Amino acid sequence: MSLLLASCSASTKPSDMMARLVTELQDVPETRMIFYNDANPDTENFMTQEYITKIYYQDFEINALCAEYAVFMGSGGAPYEIHILKARATSNMPEILSALQTRKDLLQSKNAAAYNPDAYDVTMTAKVFSKEKYAVLLVTKDNEQAEKLIQKLI
């Protein structure tokens, strides 16, 4: 009985959410990189501070602000990204959401500078949202479906 109660009260890890998204969404790029907070620093799935600075902004301290995270970066012609960041504290949410909004703005401005019809549609419909301690950035071909899946898992 205690095992059942413990499993009901535990929140879903961003890495588990990401696994579900990758398997259930359509048109997920085959060539991709997925970063996890608990990845071994010697693996390619570990997000270095240099890379964190490159995708968010210089002073963003993802490991200090986030208890857990999973970040999907597709590689290919059109941008495809999913960022699921779980805040350590509710008070960290404004800064985490700001980092995701900054990333969204960067993707949209880069896309506008180098017009590509496929990339334009995807980046212009990018979405940032939050629920409880989770902050999410979606840059997919079906943000609505991705958000529905995430909302069910939180």
Image (spheres, rainbow, N blue to C red):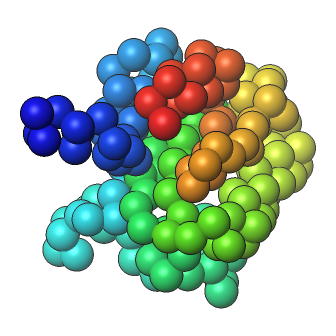
Q: Residue furthest front?
A: 1
x 50%, y 24%: residue: 152
Residue 96, image x and y in percent? 66, 66
Left or right, residue 17 beside residue 83: left
Give whichever of 135, 132 is nearer the camera. 132
Give whichever of 96, 60 is nearer the camera. 96
Residue 101, image x and y in percent? 78, 56
x 72%, y 43%: residue: 129
Residue 153 sits above or below residue 81 on the image: above
Give whichever of 136, 106 is nearer the camera. 136
x 45%, y 77%: residue: 63
Residue 120, image x and y in percent? 81, 31
Residue 130 sits above or below residue 103 on the image: above
Residue 42, image x and y in percent? 17, 74
* Image quarter in which the N terminus is found: top left
x 40%, y 61%: residue: 68
Give whichever of 133, 128 is nearer the camera. 133
Left or right, residue 39 beside residue 152: left
- Residue 59 in view: yes
Left or right, residue 104 beside residue 147: right
- Residue 76 in view: no
- Give the total number of marks visible in the rendering: 0
Residue 125 sits above or below residue 75 on the image: above
